[in-house]
Image (cartoon, helix red, strand yellow):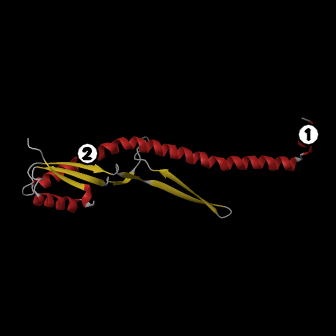
């Protein structure tokens, strides 16, 4: 204990001032990192709350897309009854609006800060500026006329015209007799 006691006694006011200012500087440097972490947690909370609503929208979109494709394919000569199943690569993406602030600090350094913009201040629903729809990965088409090669080619051509996927990701089969 004696060496520590001797060290503290030898420190003059200037050294104490430097030590105190160093501590304050470290504290100031640590505060913005905590603030950014809190904002990221808030963003994650808002996005998880919004994801439930987005999942319902995606399911509605998928169902509507399959129904519309069935209606179109039924109009093809010889197709007959048609059932469609569409698979998607993902659930789409919501682009959340962010407020970005840039502050220039001394010694040629700058700091960026992002924060999510919310619909209403009291609710944690982020403002979505754009919604990207899910990408179609594959299509299964079951048609009464799926055994006829001409009808099959017409159905394939229609599906290729409507969706930006490769031909090998579209499968057309004949519907079983009821």
Q: Is residue 125 left or right of residue 145?
A: right
Residue at position x 69%, y 46% from top? 27
- 73 or 115: nearer the viewer: 73
Quarter of the image for residue 157 reads bottom left
Tell me, yes or no, if residue 121 can be seen here: no
- 7 or 100: nearer the viewer: 7
Q: Quadrant of the N terminus?
A: top right
Dot 1 falls on a residue whose secondary structure is helix
- 177 or 135: nearer the viewer: 177
Other residues around mark 1 within 10 Å, as few (<14) / some (14–19) / many (≥20): few
In the displayed orientation, state which residue is furthest to the top: 1
Residue at position x 30%, y 50% from top? 88
> Tag on residue 3?
1
Q: Is residue 45 left or right of residue 82?
A: right
From the top left corner, tell me how far across and down residue 152 is, in percent.
14, 57
Figure disc tally: 2
Residue at position x 58%, y 46% from top? 35
Q: Is residue 6 left or right of residue 157?
A: right
Q: Kindly identify which residue carries mark 2.
A: 60
From the top left corner, tell me how far across and down residue 81 is, in percent.
10, 48
From the top left corner, tell me how far across and down residue 62 is, in percent.
25, 48
Residue at position x 76%, y 49% from top? 22
Label 2, label 1: how far apart the Cα atoms are: 75 Å
């Amino acid at each position: 204990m004696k060496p520590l006691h001797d060290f503290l006694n030898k420190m003059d006011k200037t050294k104490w001032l430097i030590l105190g200012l160093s501590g304050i500087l470290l504290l100031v440097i640590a505060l913005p990192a905590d603030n950014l972490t809190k904002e990221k947690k808030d963003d994650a909370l808002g996005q998880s709350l919004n994801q439930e609503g987005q999942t319902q929208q995606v399911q509605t979109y998928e169902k509507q897309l399959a129904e519309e494709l069935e209606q179109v394919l039924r109009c093809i000569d010889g197709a007959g009854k048609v059932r469609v199943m569409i698979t998607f690569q993902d659930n789409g993406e919501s682009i959340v609006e962010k407020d970005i602030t840039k502050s220039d600090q001394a010694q040629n350094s700058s700091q960026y800060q992002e924060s999510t913009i919310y619909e209403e201040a009291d609710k944690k629903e982020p403002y979505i500026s754009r919604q990207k729809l899910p990408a179609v990965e594959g299509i299964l088409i079951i048609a009464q006329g799926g055994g006829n090669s001409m009808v099959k080619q017409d159905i394939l051509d229609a599906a290729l015209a409507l969706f930006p996927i490769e031909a090998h990701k579209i499968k057309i089969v004949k519907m079983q007799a009821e």
